[in-house]
Amino acid sequence: MNRFSSFTKRRAIDDPASPTRSKRRMAIIVGVILVIVALVAAAMFMGDGGENAPAAAAEGDAQQAQTVTVIVPGRSEVARTLTASGTLAARRDQPVGIAGQGGRVTQVLVDAGDWVRQGQLLASIDRSVQAQQAAQLRASLAAAQADADLARNELDRAAQLVERGFVSKADIDRKQAAYDAAVARVGVARAQLAATNAQIGQLDVRAPTSGLILDRNVEVGQVVSAGTPQLFRMARGGEMELRARLSQQDLTGLSVGLPATVIPTGTDRRIQGRIWQISPIIDPQSRQGEVRIAIPYDRAIRPGGFAEALIESGVTNAPLLPQSAVLADARGNYVYIVNGDNEVERRDVRVGTVDDRGVTIASGIDGSEAIVARAGSFLTPGQKVSPRRQAAREE
């Protein structure tokens, strides 16, 4: 009986359809899955820790001791060139208007852009009334001259008769007075005619000097007078200039006669000129003064236009850096230097001139510092670096 019971229980357990065997198999499967999950997690953890941890450490070390190229620029003799901008204008802008009483314009002989010589006729004004007045005065002058001639003849005859006693001394005095009055009337008539002729001459608008007509503001048929605005504008001798504005500090290094190159906006023309005037005052609002650069006439120059000037203001002794070494932000221009502890420091600088050779530093460094030559934007103040020095100028 007992053997049969034991056999029965063993058979029930070995039977695949037995509930007990199913639970046991399920427990084994779950255990295997858990073991696999644990092994995968361990592998992932070991892989991440084994690969990324050394990389992170290496990256931290690299950040702490990044290799940078530095230069010690010293000081160089650099041509000091100031860049300024301003407005083009005639050096002597001459307005030409009507000097006489005026009238109706009968002809205009020149236009804007024409070259004229001194005294050349630019425009004429109707003079029909003045011409008639001149004719009347010429007739009056002729009559006065005839009266003077008659008085002179009578005085001469009376002088011959006074010696014979036919004419008294008083008669001679009266005839002398009559002759003098006639001569005076001739002078008055002649002066009146000359004044009228001068007025007629003023009806001709003529060029006060030789030069270039810049603007024409008169047309045939227009009525003009002494109060009419300028009829023409002209540049004396065609001379032009650039009126540039510079800071008070820049003005101190300039003097009359320094050469300058003027480049009109929109062109590639480079016109050579010289400073002919420096403003003796500073604008209290902008803290700038005006520099006037005389330049010869050129077709690219249009008064009222804009231009840039490069002013050669001598030679300066200053540090010269490559453009990659100079950075800028909201605070202004700066460079990074590497101190004695191999740490990065920011140094604010003032830039002088910029050209193909590099950037001239006007102030902020003296040239003895180790300046980060490039990649400064990837550094931060206080960062440890490994400096690698190179020559200040690469050939």
Image: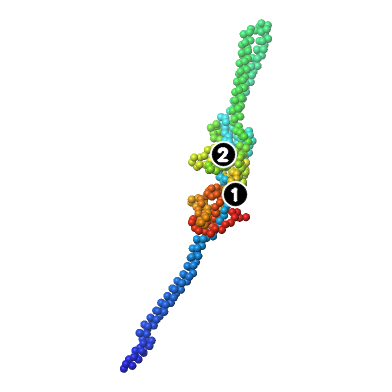
Residue carrying label 1:
76
Residue shown at 57% from the left, 35% from the top: 95
Distance CA(mark 1)–CA(mark 2): 29 Å
Residue count near mark 1 (Cα–Cα under 10 Å), binned few <14, some 14–19, many ≥20:
some
Q: Is residue 373 above or below residue 84?
A: below
Q: Is residue 108 above or below residue 393?
A: above
Depth check, mark 1 against mark 2: the one in front is 1
Residue 219: image x %, image y %? 57, 37
Question: The C terminus is located in which quarter?
Answer: bottom right
Type of amino acid under label 2: Ile
Residue 281: image x %, image y %? 53, 38
Mark linked to residue 178: none
Residue 84, can we see it? yes
Type of amino acid under label 1: Ser
Residue shown at 47% from the left, 67% from the top: 53
Residue shown at 39% from the left, 83% from the top: 25
Residue 149: image x %, image y %? 65, 16
**Secondary structure beneath disc 1?**
strand
> Extreme bottom residue here?
1
Mark linked to residue 278: 2
Which quadrant of the figure has residue 210?
top right
Of the residues under marks 1 and 2, which one precedes in the sequence? 1
